[in-house]
Image: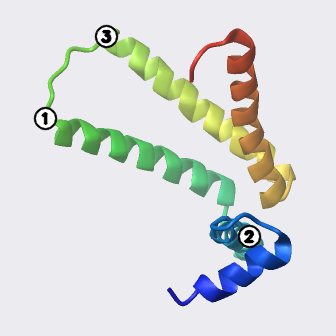
Amino acid sequence: MALDTPLAALERHCGLARGHGRFFLNAGAFIGLMVVSNALEEELYTNLPGFDYFKAVACLELATFAAAALLAERRSGLKTPRKAPLAFYAVLGASMALSQTLGKLANKYVNFTVSTIFKCSKALTRVEINQITETEI
């Protein structure tokens, strides 16, 4: 490949094991592109007059989840019986919608990058709880 020579030079220069240069190059590119993406997205959303980012994203997420669930159910072709009454699914959906909306409203007071870090911290907390209780996700 065209990147083999520069990657070998990167590995020698940084003292990396052979083959690890591609990982570090990809990880660095990913982090760099995420920073650029976050900065551009925040700039875009804060400069559109009359655009309510938080309501728009909450509605878009809920619509996407609903459409994905409907598509998955229709494509699977499996007609498995529900394991819980339909009312429980409605309550679960409403609580998820409420939590997403409240999360968006709470994140209104911090910038996009901090908001993303807060969202990721939920996953880390869950992993730690699983490690302590020795359960699987």
Q: Is 34 above or below relative to 94?
A: below
Q: Locate residue 108, reporting x and y percent.
A: 79, 51
For label 2, count other residues whose C-alpha is less than 10 Å away and answer few (under 14), some (14-19) or many (20+): few
Q: Locate residue 5, reporting x and y percent.
A: 63, 87
The residue carrying mark 3 is: 83
Q: Three-letter amino acid code at disc 1?
A: Gly
**Label 3 vs label 2: CA separation?**
44 Å
Q: Quadrant of the C terminus?
A: top right
Where residue 28 is drawn, which disc sits there? 2
**Helix, strand or loop under label 3:** loop
**Label 2 vs label 1: CA separation?**
42 Å
Which residue shows up at 64% across the image and 32% down it?
A: 99
For label 1, count other residues whose C-alpha is less than 10 Å away and answer few (under 14), some (14-19) or many (20+): few
- The mark nearer the N terminus, 3 or 1, is 1
The residue carrying mark 1 is: 77
**Label 3 vs label 1: CA separation?**
17 Å
Contact between labelled residues 2 and 3, with CB atoms less than 8 Å apart: no
**Camera-side residue: 130 or 62?**
130
Q: Is 33 above or below relative to 78?
A: below
Q: Locate residue 19, reporting x and y percent.
A: 63, 67
Closer to the eye: label 2 or 1: 2
Q: Locate residue 15, reporting x and y percent.
A: 83, 69
Q: Is residue 43 visible?
A: no
**Camera-side residue: 61 or 21?**
21
**Camera-side residue: 58 or 127?**
127
